[in-house]
Image: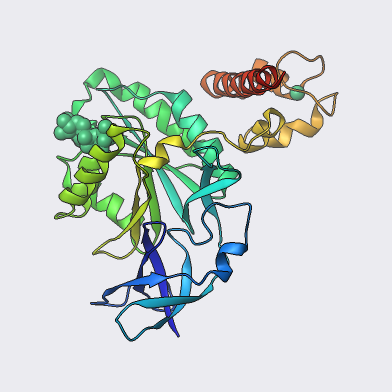
Amino acid sequence: MIYGRVIKSTGKWYKVISCTDNGQPVEGAEVIMCQLPGKFRLMEIQQTNPLAVGDFVDFTMLDDGGGMVQHIHERENRISRKATHGRKGEQILVSNVDQAFVIQALAQPAYRTGFIDRFIVTAEAFGVKPLIVLNKADLGKESDAESIGRLIDLYESLGYSLILTSIFDEESIKELQGLMKDKTSVFIGPSGTGKTSLLNAIQPGLDRTVGEVSTFSQKGKHTTTYAELIPLDTGGYVVDTPGIREFGLIYLEPAEIASYFVELKPLREKCRYYNCTHLHEPGCAVMEAFDRGEISASRYNSYISMFESLEDEIKSAGSRKR
Ligand SMILES: Nc1nc2c(ncn2[C@@H]2O[C@H](COP(=O)(O)OP(=O)(O)OP(=O)(O)O)[C@@H](O)[C@H]2O)c(=O)[nH]1
Ligand SMILES: [Mg+2]
Ligand SMILES: [Zn+2]
């Protein structure tokens, strides 16, 4: 049996790269086109894809040079979305992800803390470590220094790393490379913040692959798109997928949101009501902490806006049913 990792899926065939015990590609390893025996398709009916990009497998070689998957190793985590095209259940975009980077820009387009906080909540819910990148640091003016400092302080005080990068600053690219070494990372962020540019700087020679997938995503909904894992020369993998755009708050209940805000989490049990929404209730420990200046306004605003948008989704889904 050969140990390997699925790096690409076409739905019928899976590209598998053989790996050492630590999950890194074997040096000079060929990519094997593998098939999946039918018995796996009967399992996991909750999921539209029994074998996902990112999965670790054991496979055997066939006479024709292809492979046959024999065993799928248990997933540590997965990033998924609701299945599309009227199918039931969940579609796994990628599994066994160590960390997710949210890529924001200092300008063009300017960063939004609301986006960062929504991303953090989602990453935490998927069990993936979130990291924040503020790119295009070269566009910063002297007058930005104070607000950048405050932003870094805020997120570092919550336990999240925030790194300043620029594709023109080699040191910052090296810092990113160091963080990505031997890990499986995904890049998420609004259009134009520099995700593709950063990936190209991290792995020169990648440009074509990234470009292709990027144009693909802009064509929109009718093309079936799958995530792809790109092995990095420096060790590790990065996920390239247009589907990551749908990194939304898909499986969360409004009441769960507060548990993914590290600074709100410990306060919840001090609220007078067990089902406190922290929006208006008397005796709410979160609102009291906010009044004492212990919770940042931008974070509390993000909490409110996420809570309300999830409630709205539930309401509109309910009214469609009726
Ligand atoms: N000044 C400056 N410009 C940058 C930097 N990084 C990227 N850019 C520019 O920003 C623009 C958008 O970069 P992309 O890499 O295409 O952004 P993206 O996040 O991949 O965008 P989508 O693929 O649309 O999601 C390009 O014109 C880049 O040259 C940076 O660090 N500094
Ligand atoms: Mg791009
Ligand atoms: Zn409360």
Q: Does residue 104 lie above or below 240 as drawn?
A: above
Any part of residue 154 in sight: no
In the drawing, does residue 3 fall left or right of residue 80?
left
> Which residue is nearer to you in this view: 152 or 219?
219
Q: Does residue 102 lie above or below 70 as drawn?
A: above
At 48% from the left and 35% from the top, the residue drawn is 119
> Which residue is nearer to you in this view: 193 or 152?
193
**Residue 240: x and y, percent?**
32, 49
**Residue 90: x and y, percent?**
57, 46
Within the image, what quadrant is residue 287 found in? top right
Any part of residue 142 in sight: yes
> Which residue is nearer to you in this view: 29 or 36?
36
> Which residue is nearer to you in this view: 304 or 162?
304
At 39% from the left and 60% from the top, the residue drawn is 183
At 68% from the left and 32% from the top, the residue drawn is 253
Quadrant of the displayed image that contains ligand 2: top left
Q: In which quarter of the image is the C terminus?
A: top right
Structure colour scheme: rainbow
Q: Does residue 204 lie above or below 313 as drawn?
A: below
**Residue 305: x and y, percent?**
57, 19
Q: Does residue 94 lie above or below 182 as drawn?
A: above
**Residue 138: x and y, percent?**
18, 31
Q: In which quarter of the image is the N terminus?
A: bottom left
**Labels in figure, total:** 0
